[in-house]
Image (cartoon, helix red, strand yellow):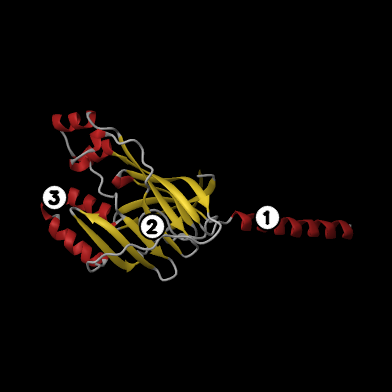
């Protein structure tokens, strides 16, 4: 009986060790993640009414889809628009349907809790340098499979009222994600932001054999902080009305 217990304990220890080894092999330190960003354009029109709004919905695709990529190491990441994009839809040109994120870049240094972001703000390209936005996440016991990774659900409220649903994997140790999102014990591979009618989901993950990441963006002009950017936006968006001013601010600050 004692021998059986001893053998069982040895087996359990060997199984635990093997499981840890397998998990260690699965953890990615360096790589590239491709994301699909999907904006529900019809939902964006919910603030409008009347014949014009209905006609606009009929003449635009339901979704505006674009591709992004995120390079990562254990302590840093850089997020930018991918060169590989879906076929252009001519109905997405101009007005509120135009995308201004072609040259947007977000570099995050997890160790120093700093961020350098290049943002297209209306007609100007701005460089933002600041500390990483702090996000109070609530981790749940819900899971979702994304890009062949088991991801855990977490939620947060940012900018006072914007609810974010995220799914992260601890198979990638870099605490980062699309745009400015950070602060979870692993990489964020899926995001839904209902108030902005937008989702970001990883479509593929490529492992690098050694550290590689593009340099953070630079500018000849002086960089601004998020506080200074908000002050600029407050003045520029005063005539937009409360709803559209808030939505524009959220999009630009995310």
Mark 3 neighbour class, 10 Å CA radius: few under 14, some 14 to 19, many 20 or more: few
Residue 23 point in image, percent of width and height: 62, 55
User: How far is mark 2 from mark 1, CA to CA?
Assistant: 30 Å
Q: Which of marks 2 and 3 is nearer the N terminus?
A: 2
Outermost residue on the left side: it is 239
Question: Disc 1 designates what residue?
Answer: 19
Mark 2 neighbour class, 10 Å CA radius: few under 14, some 14 to 19, many 20 or more: many
Q: Give the secondary structure at mark 3.
A: helix
Q: Earlier in the sequence, mark 3 or mark 1?
A: 1
Question: Disc 3 designates what residue?
Answer: 240
Above or below, 52 against 18 in this view is above
Q: In this view, does 207 lie to the left or right of 192?
A: right
Outermost residue on the bottom side: it is 112
User: How far is mark 2 from mark 3, CA to CA?
Assistant: 27 Å
Q: Residue at x 34, y 56 (%)?
A: 157
Q: Which mark is residue 181?
A: 2
- Give whichever of 221, 20 is nearer the camera: 221
Residue 173 point in image, percent of width and height: 52, 60
Q: Determine contact: label 2, label 3, CB under 8 Å.
A: no
Q: In which quarter of the image is the C terminus?
A: bottom left
Q: Is residue 162 left or right of residue 96?
A: right
Residue 222 point in image, percent of width and height: 23, 69
Q: Which mark is residue 2?
A: none
Res 24 quadrant in image: bottom right
Q: Residue at x 73, y 55 (%)?
A: 15
Res 65 quadrant in image: top left
Q: Is residue 216 left or right of residue 42?
A: right
Residue 69 point in image, percent of width and height: 41, 50
């Amino acid at each position: 009986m004692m021998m059986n217990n001893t053998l069982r304990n040895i087996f359990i220890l060997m199984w635990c060790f093997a499981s840890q080894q397998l998990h260690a092999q699965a953890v990615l330190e360096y790589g590239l993640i491709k994301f699909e960003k999907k904006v529900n354009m019809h939902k964006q029109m919910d603030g409008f009414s009347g014949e014009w709004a209905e006609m606009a919905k009929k003449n635009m695709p339901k979704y505006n889809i674009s591709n992004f990529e995120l390079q990562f190491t254990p302590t840093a990441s850089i997020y930018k628009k991918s060169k590989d994009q879906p076929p252009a839809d001519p109905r997405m040109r101009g007005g509120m349907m135009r995308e201004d994120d072609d040259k947007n870049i977000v570099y995050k240094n997890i160790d120093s809790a700093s961020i350098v972001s290049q943002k297209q703000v209306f007609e100007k390209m701005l460089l933002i340098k600041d500390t990483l936005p702090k996000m109070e996440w609530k981790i749940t016991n819900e899971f979702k499979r994304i890009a062949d990774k088991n991801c855990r659900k977490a939620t947060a409220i940012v900018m006072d009222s914007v609810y974010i649903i995220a799914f992260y994997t601890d198979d990638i140790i870099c605490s980062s994600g699309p745009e400015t999102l950070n602060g979870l014990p692993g990489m964020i591979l899926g995001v839904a932001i209902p108030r902005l009618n937008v989702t970001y989901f990883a479509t593929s993950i490529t492992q690098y054999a050694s550290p590689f990441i593009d340099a953070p963006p630079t500018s000849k002009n002086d960089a601004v902080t998020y506080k200074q950017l908000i002050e600029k936006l407050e003045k520029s968006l005063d005539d937009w009305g409360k709803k559209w001013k808030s939505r524009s601010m959220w999009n630009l600050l995310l």
